[in-house]
Amino acid sequence: MATLTVLKFPTVTGAEQTLSILGDLQKQQLITIIDAATVIWPTDKKNPKTQQLHNLAAAGALGGVFWGMLFGLLFFMPFLGAAIGAATGALAGAFSDIGIDDNFIKEVREKVAPGTSALFLMSSDAVLDRVRDALQGQQFELIASNLSNEQEAKLKEYFSEE
């Protein structure tokens, strides 16, 4: 089963560094990255820069349309005003079917701000102890995951500082 996870970093370089580490782990078959995208928001920019991992050949890859619609809903549509309110509502409704609801949108908007970055990761088959060891020293906050509440609590506990 694939897991969609969103990690927020206190620096603009954190998401790309972590994705690079996870890419190395994938080469060692310690995690399968189905798809990923980063959001980088320099302090001097009005809007964040988004980039999709170009892994479209992978089975289950979400594709540019998904990431584009999600990032538009999260970061760009709030600035476009009420003229597209109905379209925004319909888009938000479609995402709620997969666990991306108003609370998720609000939390991501509040936490991913200028001077930070985020990693949106769809993965499977992670060897958690090896992933945790590889990410030692990386500072991040788990914003959201499509794991059950119990699984998400265990994941947060597992990656919290000991």
Image: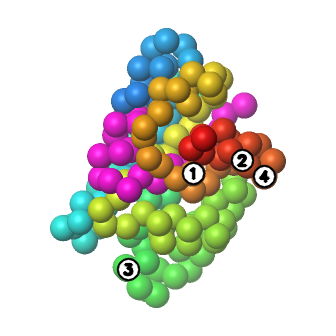
Identified at 72% across, 31% down, the residue is 1
CA gap between label 2 and label 1 equals 9 Å
Identity of the residue furthest to the front in this view = 162
Q: Amino acid at mark 3?
A: Leu
Identified at 34% across, 37% down, the residue is 17
Identify residue for label 4. Answer: 149
Identify residue for label 2. Answer: 152
Identity of the residue furthest to the bottom in this view = 82
Q: Earlier in the sequence, mark 1 or mark 3?
A: 3
CA gap between label 1 and label 3 equals 28 Å
Identify residue for label 1. Answer: 142
**Quadrant in which residue 126 is drawn:** top right
| Residues shaded magenta | 1-19
Q: Residues within 10 Å of mark 4 (few under 14, many from 20)?
A: few
Q: Nearer the viewer, mark 1 or mark 3?
A: 1
Counting from the top left corner in percent of width and height, residue 13 is at: 29, 46
Task: Find numbered disc 3 in the image and state the secondary structure of the residue it sits on.
Answer: loop
Identify residue for label 3. Answer: 80
Counting from the top left corner in percent of width and height, residue 144 is at: 61, 54
Toward the viewer: 75 or 148? 148
Q: Earlier in the sequence, mark 3 or mark 4?
A: 3
CA gap between label 4 and label 1 equals 13 Å
Q: Earlier in the sequence, mark 4 or mark 1?
A: 1
Lateral position of residue 87 relative to residue 39, left or right: right
Q: Earlier in the sequence, mark 2 or mark 1?
A: 1
